[in-house]
Image (spheres, rainbow, N blue to C red):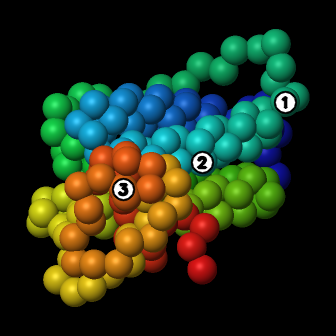
Amino acid sequence: MDTNFEKSQTKENLMRAFAGESQARNRYTFAAEKAKEAKLHVIDAIFTFTAHQERAHAKVFYDFLKDEAGKNINIDGTYPVDIYEKIPELLRAAQHNEFQEYENDYKNFSKIAREEGFIGISNTFNMIAEVEKTHGERFGQFADLLEQGKLFVSDFETSWICLNCGHIYNGKEVPAVCPICKHDKGFFIRVELSPYSK
């Protein structure tokens, strides 16, 4: 049964999603700053990379609300406070929140939108849910590496890339500094985990 958008739950869910994505972007920006302070530049890059994607999601949800321009939409919701000193805790909190969006929030929002007759919005919630799953998996993978002491060390010879200059180094452990740009080891990432790798 089609529902009037003005009176729909979907309108409120879009605003909840916009608020959630906007907050996630800021949380990841704050986490990136913490990682940078800890000289974990690769973790800084991952949080920043994900923050940009959260901004893109927020815009998609916000654009669905264009007919509400000039109005206020009242919503309730719960949002996490992820203020931690340790980088693995920030990664685990981000992993949890991304899986929450994937498994619960956006799947539920999609179901409601479909029931209300907003098929395009329903499909968008489902597609963005899949992206959030990828975010959660990525945060979890890097939390695992950090907790296991394997962010910059491998059990076998691996190719590593410097995120600053692109130098590729082969070995079991990254060099203390990049031989080309002299940036510290915190800029190295396994080539297979870097963005834009083959």
Report x, y in % for residue 7: 74, 32
- Mark on residue 178? 3
Q: Earlier in the sequence, mark 1 or mark 2?
A: 2
Q: CA distance from mark 1 to mark 3?
A: 48 Å
Nearer mark to the viewer, of 2 and 3: 3
Q: Decide: is 138 above or below 37.
A: below
Q: Nearer the viewer, residue 170 or 121?
A: 170
| The residue positioned farthest toward the right in the image shown | 67
Classify residue 95 as left or right of residue 61. Answer: left
Residue 52 shows up from this direction: yes
- Mark on residue 53? 2
| The residue positioned farthest toward the bottom in the image shown | 156
Q: Decide: is 62 above or below 140.
A: above
Nearer mark to the viewer, of 1 and 2: 2
| The residue positioned farthest toward the front in the image shown | 179
Q: Earlier in the sequence, mark 1 or mark 3?
A: 1
Q: CA distance from mark 1 to mark 2?
A: 21 Å
Q: Which residue is mark 1?
A: 66
Type of residue at label 1?
Lys
What element does badge 2 sit on?
Answer: helix
Q: Looking at the rendering, which quadrant does residue 36 occupy?
A: top left
Type of residue at label 3?
Cys
Quadrant where the image shows the N terminus: bottom right
Classify residue 77 as left or right of residue 198. Answer: left
Report x, y in % for residue 129: 55, 60
What element does badge 3 sit on?
Answer: loop
Q: Nearer the viewer, residue 70 or 188?
A: 188
Q: Looking at the rendering, which quadrant does residue 111 occupy?
A: bottom right
Q: Are marks 1 and 2 in contact (CB under 8 Å)?
A: no
Residue occupying image coordinates x 37% and y 58%: 179
| The residue positioned farthest toward the left in the image shown | 148
